[in-house]
């Protein structure tokens, strides 16, 4: 067999460039070395860019959110406030970066103006005024301490003030002074059913006008029989009853001067123009349309039927369905809702069946 020459067994001759590419290709030692050197150069370049002072850092999403929600982004931000004016907080703001080697517990707590913020003291609401003279457990006391219908003049929240619509006048509580005369008496614009001139305090007169008008719209025509009586007028009326009936009987139907609600200018006696005059100032008046209407609607205008059947031992007077007393809408309606038939009981006070 012929022998193949040595030059025929060798690989073809390679150019110098091909040999270099071969020696420095992976996984030869030269190729591995070049790979590591290239990786080192890339990492070093990235670190250099991050530390460059002229290179802006990537925006924080939280900061971007704050900027987007600023009312006017065209306004230039004000210079940062000194650290001493920052409010103390234990929770770092989401847009503040912390050093990787620092702990949040190492950050000093800051306080307002360098001091500790004092806790806010709640403002106490002053209690609503109570009605002077009424029992603390009474409905009247509860009504006014709840803040309902409190007058601007606090002196009117006094059942002993003769100028107050709340004044209590009975056989235990005379007007003070006993010769009291209201300073704001006016003539109410209502039909009059007797020769006695009509006079009431201004507030009660306006309420009476509204009440008479409301009744008329429902076909009930009330008349005014009696209203304000002076101390002297009341003395003459009471003395006439004493002469005709005796003192004991007179005290059940007429008040002594100084002890009469009529003298306060807040009381009226009514009649019914559609009923017989024979029942005026008599118990049969309770059957008239006028008496029944005021029993159901007087409180809507601030009046109450002052002396009702069954309350004689408390009020000291026989029932008078014609006698109305002005106490204000809030009290009158509250008395009706709560089922009180005497003003004394509503005030939480004992009855006054007789003079002391």
Image (tube, helix red, strand yellow):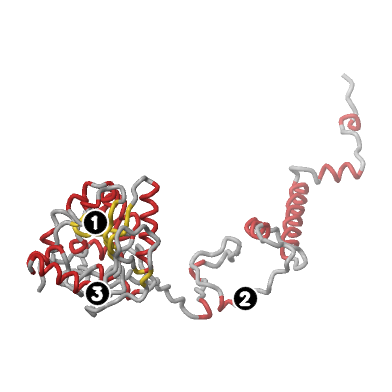
The answer to which of 162 and 144 lies nearer the viewer is 162
Tell me, for residue 67, which label it has, or none. Answer: none
The spot of residue 64 in percent (x, y) is 67, 57
Residue 53 quadrant: bottom right
Label 3 element class = loop
Tell me the element at label 2.
Answer: loop
For image coordinates 19% across by 64% down, the residue present is 344
Q: Which comes before the other along the chain, label 1 or label 2?
A: 2
Q: Quadrant of residue 71?
A: bottom right
Can you give x and y, in whole percent of width and height, for residue 225 in the image? 28, 60
Compared across the picture, whether 68 is left or right of 198 comes to: right
Instruction: Read off the residue under disc 2.
Output: 81
Q: Which residue is mark 1?
A: 322
Residue denoted by label 3: 160
Q: Nearer the viewer, mark 1 or mark 2?
A: 1
Give x and y (percent) for residue 304.
27, 58
């Amino acid at each position: 067999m012929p022998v193949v020459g040595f030059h025929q067994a060798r690989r073809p001759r390679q150019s110098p460039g091909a040999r270099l590419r071969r020696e420095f290709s992976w996984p030869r030692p030269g190729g591995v070395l070049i790979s590591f050197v290239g990786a080192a150069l890339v990492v070093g370049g990235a670190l250099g860019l991050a530390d460059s002072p002229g290179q802006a850092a990537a925006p924080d999403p939280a900061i971007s959110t704050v900027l987007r929600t600023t009312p006017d982004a065209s306004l230039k931000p004000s210079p940062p406030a000194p650290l001493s004016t920052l409010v103390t907080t234990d929770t770092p703001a989401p847009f503040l970066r912390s050093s990787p080697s620092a702990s949040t517990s190492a950050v000093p707590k800051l306080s307002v103006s360098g001091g500790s913020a004092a806790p806010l003291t709640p403002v106490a609401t002053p209690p609503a005024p109570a009605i002077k003279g009424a029992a603390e457990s009474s409905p009247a006391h509860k009504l006014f301490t709840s803040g309902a219908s409190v007058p601007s003049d606090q002196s009117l929240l006094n059942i002993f003030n003769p100028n107050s619509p709340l004044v209590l006048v009975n056989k235990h509580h005379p007007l003070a002074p006993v010769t009291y005369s209201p300073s704001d008496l006016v003539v109410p614009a209502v039909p009059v059913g007797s020769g006695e001139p009509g006079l009431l305090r201004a507030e009660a007169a306006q309420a009476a006008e509204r009440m008479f008008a409301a009744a008329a719209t429902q076909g009930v025509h009330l008349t005014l029989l009696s209203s304000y009586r002076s101390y002297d007028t009341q003395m003459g009326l009471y003395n006439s009853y004493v002469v005709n009936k005796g003192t004991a009987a007179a005290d059940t139907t007429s008040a002594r001067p100084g002890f009469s609600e009529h003298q306060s200018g807040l009381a009226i006696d009514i009649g019914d123009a559609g009923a017989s005059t024979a029942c005026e100032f008599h118990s049969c008046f309770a059957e008239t349309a006028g008496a029944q209407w005021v029993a159901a609607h007087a409180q809507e205008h601030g009046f109450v039927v002052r002396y009702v059947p069954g309350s004689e031992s408390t009020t000291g007077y026989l029932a008078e369905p014609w006698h109305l007393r002005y106490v204000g809408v809030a009290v009158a309606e509250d008395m009706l809702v709560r089922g009180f038939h005497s003003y004394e009981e509503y005030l939480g006070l004992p009855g006054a069946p007789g003079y002391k």
